[in-house]
Each structure stands twice: as C-alpha cells, then as structure tokens.
C-alpha cells in the first residue's frame, strides 16, 4: 500500500474534524484562526472558498502555472489582513476582490516580462498586449468587483461558489427573500454592463481544488502566521506583500492632495504677486428666525415625533399575542341558553414572517409582518333544559381558533 496506517488514520481524523467545522460561519472560522491559530479552521475556509478563488484566478490568468501562485497569494493576503477584514463584508466577496486584483497584477507583470523578452529577441515582432476587457472572463470579474458589497457577496456565494440560497442567506445573516432580491439586482446590473463589453452574462460552475494545493496553501499560511517563511514560495510572498501597497499609496496621494488644496485656499490672496484671484461675493447672512417661525418649527417637529411614536407603538403592539377578548370574539357563538365558564386560553405562534419592503398605497415603502396564531380555548359549557323539568347540564369542551395578525411597518421614506 502507498500510505501507512498511521498516516491514513491521521488524514481521516483531519477530514472528520474539518467536517465538524462545516456548520460554522466564515466569521467564526476566521476568529478561531486569528485567536488560536487553528489550522483546521483555516483549512475549512480554503476548502469552502478555494474553488471560487481558483476560478477567479484562472479567468484572469488562463490555465497557467501562475494560477496556483495567485491562489496561494490570495489566502496569504487573508492571513495578513485577517484582523482587519470588515465585519460588515462577507468573506467570499472580499476574497473574490483580492483574488482578481492579485491575478491582474500578476498578469501585468507577466505581460511586461514577455514583452521585454520578445523585444530583446525580435524588436520588430513586439505588438501591443491583449486588453483585459477583450476576454469576457476578465470583464465578468471586473464588473462583479464593481457591484455594491451586498450584491457582490450574494452573487459570489450563489453563482461563483454554487452555494444554496438557504446556506448563503445564513452566511450573510439575512432572509432568503432579501438574498433573492440582491441576486436579482446584481444580475440586472451585470446584464446591463456586460453587453457594453461585447459579452453576455454566462453561467459559471464551481471548480475543484486539489488536495495538494490545499495542503500547501494551509501549511504556508499557518507557518507564515507563526512567523516562519520557509514554506512560502518567494514569488507568492512578494505578490502578497505588494498587494496593498498601491492602495496605500493612492490613499496617501489623496490625503496629500487634499492638504495641498487646503493650504492653497487658505493662503489665497495673501501674496502680492501673481494674477488676481476672482472671488465670489459671500452669500448674504440669513436673518435670525422670528418667534412665530420658531413656534411653527417646534410644532412641526412635535407632530413628526408623535407620528413616529404612534407608528412604533402600532408595530410593537402587532408583535404581542392576541388578547383574550380577541380570542373569545373569534370563538363560535354559544348555543341559546348556554353559558361558558372556567375559560383557559393557550396561545401558540405557528408562523412569523417579515416580507421584503415594497410600495403600499397611502403608506409608501413598508414591510408586512405576518403572524399566525393557534389559540386553544378550554371551558365548561352549561346548558339549561327547561322542559319537562329544568335541568342544567355541564360539559367540558375545547375549541381551537386561528388568528392572523398583519401589520405594515414603514421604512425609510414612508408617508406619515
């Protein structure tokens, strides 16, 4: 046999442990890695997002040996920036953006190297490099990166990683309906932008990452996090080191430019030389409001606050169980001459759903909160039989009624 029994047992133990982490979210796995250097937690992240990262690198670089370098550099960048990944951003969208930028940078370096080699061999044979937009694959990843973060995260999880919508919604912490809405808007934007590049929105499938590449990536990441660079290839290390330098340099230039503009504006007119600066007259000072205007503004604010308080009270009241009076009114009418005593009501909420926001007449943008209650009413029903001899007959009964509670909860921009 090619593997010893202890080695097979060790590998089996890792698979079982990794499967036990499959129910954890990306944030939980990332916290375990940053806090405890949990190699299995990082390995679970590589197995979970590796196919998407590998596919992104391959769409930019093609099926070359550089794809694996870009793949490892992406996850090495995650090790470097694990503590600074924004809590509000899904890890899948973050990795997609980093993978594309790493691959584009590597592709440009490769093109420059190839151009120099061709120029040294045959200067007359050098031609312009292929534009990144010439390939629909690069165009797709570029447009995905331009999507707003909620749309990008939903698209990457469901269409680039092939995750089920329920799983993706749990990862993003939102209802399935909200996820479907984000997916629809993401695809609508991509369909509008990609035809401008001469391509249509393709259907992508998740690829596979070899166990060899996964093991090498996890080993390099864990050793790098521990301060060792032995297991990291020099090209991969250099690629991950240079990943964030252009962004930092750009931010520094923007800050420097803002300071220069502020200094120029502040010093404007102080020097005697140079052309005269034309200044616009300052706007006239607004007069102080009168007492009547202040009273009107105060009344308007009080009415707005009162209307907002009423809306909140109605929404909170809708969350309460049905009152006993509401349940008793929903009961079938008692027979003539019957009385009900010893009433006990048991209320169970069977369903609660919050629909996505949409336009409602006379309300504006609002979300419908729906509750479905099952109310079991236990009582003693006493019936008086007047003939031939007045007799009272009592019997224990139970009746079940169902009550729906719906309320519109206004959202931003709704009418008062």
Image: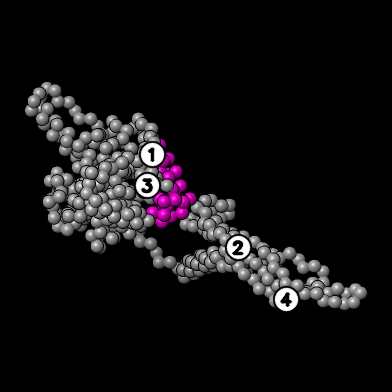
Label 3 neighbourhood size at 10 Å, few (<14), some (14-19), many (20+)? many
Determine the image quadrant of residue 203: top left
Magenta segment, prevailing SS (helix, strand or loop): helix
Image quadrant in which the C terminus is located: bottom right
Label 1 neighbourhood size at 10 Å, few (<14), some (14-19), many (20+)? some
Q: Is residue 177 magenta?
A: yes
Q: Percent x, y for residue 355? A: 52, 54
Q: Is residue 345 left or right of residue 174?
A: right
The nearer-to-camera label among 1 and 3 is 3
Q: Residue at x 72, y 69 (%)?
A: 397
Element type where label 1 sits in the image: helix
Please say whether residue 161 is visible from this viewpoint: yes
Instruction: Tell me if label 1 and label 3 are in contact, CB under 8 Å.
Output: no
Element type where label 2 sits in the image: strand
Counting residues from the N terminus, which is met first, the one under dot 1 or under dot 3?
A: 3
In whole angstroms, how far apart are the C-alphas of marks 1 and 4? 65 Å
Q: Percent x, y for residue 327? A: 66, 67
The numbered mark at residue 190 is 1
Q: Is residue 384 left or right of residue 403?
A: right
Q: Percent x, y for residue 270? A: 16, 56
Q: Which residue is mark 4?
A: 341
In whole angstroms, how far apart are the C-alphas of marks 2 and 1? 42 Å
Element type where label 3 sits in the image: helix
Q: Percent x, y for residue 317? A: 56, 67
Instruction: Tell me if label 4 and label 2 are in contact, CB under 8 Å.
Output: no
Q: Residue at x 15, y 50 (%)?
A: 231
Q: Which residue is mark 2?
A: 373
In whole angstroms, how far apart are the C-alphas of marks 2 and 3? 35 Å
């Amino acid at each position: 046999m090619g593997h010893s029994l202890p080695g097979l047992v060790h590998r089996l133990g890792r698979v079982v442990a990794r499967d036990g982490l499959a129910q954890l979210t990306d944030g939980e796995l990332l916290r375990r890695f940053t806090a405890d250097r949990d190699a299995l937690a990082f390995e679970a992240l590589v197995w979970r997002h590796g196919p998407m990262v590998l596919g992104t690198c391959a769409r930019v670089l093609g099926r070359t040996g550089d794809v694996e370098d870009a793949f490892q550099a992406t996850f090495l960048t995650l090790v470097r920036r694990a503590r600074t990944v924004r809590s509000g951003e899904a890890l899948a969208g973050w990795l997609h953006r980093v993978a594309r930028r790493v691959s584009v940078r590597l592709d440009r370096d490769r093109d420059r190297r190839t151009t120099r080699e061709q120029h040294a061999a045959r200067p007359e044979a050098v031609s312009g490099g292929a534009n990144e937009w010439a390939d629909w694959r690069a165009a797709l990843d570029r447009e995905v990166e331009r999507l707003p973060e909620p749309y990008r995260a939903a698209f990457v999880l469901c269409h680039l990683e092939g995750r089920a919508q329920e799983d993706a919604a749990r990862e993003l912490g939102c209802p399935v309906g909200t996820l479907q809405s984000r997916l629809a808007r993401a695809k609508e934007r991509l369909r509008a932008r990609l035809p401008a590049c001469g391509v249509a929105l393709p259907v992508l499938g998740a690829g596979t990452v070899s166990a060899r590449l996964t093991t090498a990536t996890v080993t390099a990441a864990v050793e790098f996090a521990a301060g060792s660079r032995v297991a990291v290839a020099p090209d991969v290390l250099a690629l991950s080191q240079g990943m964030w330098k252009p962004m930092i340099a750009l931010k520094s230039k923007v800050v420097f430019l803002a300071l220069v503009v502020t200094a120029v504006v502040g010093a404007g007119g102080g020097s005697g030389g140079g052309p005269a600066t034309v200044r616009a007259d300052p706007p006239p000072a607004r007069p102080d409001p009168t007492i009547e205007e202040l009273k009107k503004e105060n009344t308007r604010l009080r009415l707005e606050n009162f209307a907002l308080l009423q809306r909140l009270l109605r929404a909170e009241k809708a969350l309460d169980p049905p009152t006993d009076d509401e349940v008793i009114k929903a009961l079938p009418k008692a027979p003539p001459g019957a009385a009900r005593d010893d009433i006990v009501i048991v209320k169970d909420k069977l369903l609660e759903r919050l629909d996505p926001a949409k336009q409602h007449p006379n309300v504006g943008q609002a979300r419908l909160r729906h509750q479905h209650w099952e109310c079991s009413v236990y009582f003693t029903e006493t019936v008086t039989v007047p003939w031939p001899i007045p007799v009272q007959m009592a019997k224990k009964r139970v009746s079940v009624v169902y009550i729906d509670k719906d309320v519109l909860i206004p959202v931003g921009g709704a009418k008062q």
